[in-house]
């Protein structure tokens, strides 16, 4: 990434600030903006009018569509101008008007996005979020600060996640929902009021899960959610019935962790003062998420 970019791939109206590091084959379209602290890996395409700013590093093959804004400072009023980052993996797609912000001092200083994720038009990833791999955020999906989406999560259009929500692997979230609790892995979440409604059978089948695993998850769901018994009792029954089924154990452990946090959000139980990313040795105060995203 230290080699100069091929100027034939950069439109003359694009702004590439001094200090930006672009791989030689990066393409930058008309009127696009690439900030001084941006690093773009091989094969990245920055379309016309896209903005990549802040302390942002992106791997190979990422596509930034027109009018997306990636790497801006957070909308959190507690952000104090520190050197916070946005880290992006490989082969992600940011469609029109999507946005992703750098982290905050109080949140650890980094927003992390893995590889092969799709952020559809208007999707927003707030400060200090973690997006793993193969996730899809449909049109106008909003993530507040500190959310964590594990692998293969799909969030349908116009749904919004409040701060500190975690979503487990292979979960499917319906559209036009307010998600205020953690969403367990392998499940479908939706309805009115929003709740776990079953196992994500279609998604699991598409990704090659065996009928045996899917049946075990379905039975675990039935025991925990469909009986008139406390969740702790249902979880104990599931553990006794499937003591060596990894996916089932992952499901019940996720549910147990979620119960540790305020309002069913595990990440709230581990929040607290963080060391600023500039390493000055001073500890940040804990903030109020209501002050921002």
Image (cartoon, rainbow, N blue to C red):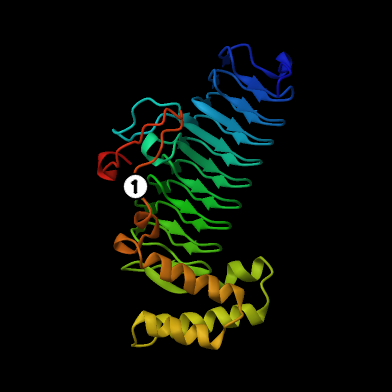
**Which quarter of the figure has residue 8?**
top right
Residue 41 falls in image quadrant? top right
Q: If the image is split into quadrants, where does the C terminus sit?
A: top left
Q: Answer above or below: position of 201 versus 181.
A: below
Nearest the viewer among 261 and 189 is 261
Q: Is 65 left, or right, of 8 in this rendering?
A: left
**Residue ID for mark 1:** 272
User: In this picture, is 287 found above or below 74?
Assistant: below
Q: The residue tagged with tag 1: helix, strand or loop?
A: loop
Label 1 crowd bin: few (<14), some (14–19), many (20+), radius 10 Å: few
**Viewer-closest of 116 and 245:** 245
Quarter residue 2 falls in: top right
Residue 241: x and y in percent read 54, 88
Look at the image and tell me whether residue 186 can be seen: yes
Identify which residue is drawn at 37% across, 25% down. Answer: 81
In the depicted view, which residue is nearer to us: 37 or 219? 37
* Residue 161, position as x, y percentages in the image: 38, 53
Q: Is residue 100 left or right of residue 45?
A: left
Give the image location of residue 26, x and y in percent.
69, 25
Q: Percent x, y for residue 139?
A: 47, 47
Q: Where 188 sits versus 147, above or below?
A: below
Q: Is residue 199 visible?
A: no
The foreground one among 54 and 286 is 286
Q: Residue furthest front?
A: 281
Q: Residue at x 41, y 33 (%)?
A: 276
Q: Tell me the quadrant of the picture where the N terminus can be found.
A: top right
């Amino acid at each position: 990434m230290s080699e100069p970019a091929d100027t034939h791939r950069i439109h003359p109206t694009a702004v590439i600030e001094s200090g930006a590091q672009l791989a030689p084959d990066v393409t930058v379209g008309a009127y696009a903006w690439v900030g001084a602290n941006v690093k773009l890996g091989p094969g990245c395409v920055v379309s016309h009018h896209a903005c990549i700013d802040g302390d942002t590093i992106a791997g190979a093959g990422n596509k930034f569509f027109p009018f997306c804004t990636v790497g801006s400072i957070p909308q959190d009023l507690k952000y104090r101008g520190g050197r916070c980052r946005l880290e992006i993996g490989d082969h992600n797609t940011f469609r029109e008007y999507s946005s992703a912000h750098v982290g905050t001092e109080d949140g650890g200083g980094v927003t992390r996005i893995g590889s092969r994720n799709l952020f559809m038009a208007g999707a927003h990833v707030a400060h200090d979020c973690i997006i793993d791999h193969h996730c899809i955020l449909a049109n106008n999906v909003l993530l507040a600060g500190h959310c964590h989406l594990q692998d293969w999560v799909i969030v349908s259009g116009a749904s919004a996640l409040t701060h500190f929500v975690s979503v487990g692997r292979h979960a499917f979230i319906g559209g036009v929902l307010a998600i205020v609790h953690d969403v367990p892995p392998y499940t479908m979440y939706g309805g009115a009021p929003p709740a776990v409604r079953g196992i994500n059978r279609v998604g699991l089948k598409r990704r090659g899960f065996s009928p045996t695993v899917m049946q075990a998850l379905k039975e675990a769901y039935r025991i925990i959610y469909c009986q008139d018994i406390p969740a702790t009792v249902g979880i104990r029954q599931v553990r006794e019935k499937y003591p060596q089924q990894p996916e089932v154990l992952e499901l019940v452990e996720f549910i147990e962790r979620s119960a540790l946090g305020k309002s069913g959000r595990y990440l709230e139980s581990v929040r607290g003062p963080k060391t600023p990313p500039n390493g000055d040795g001073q500890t940040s105060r804990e903030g109020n998420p209501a002050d921002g995203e």
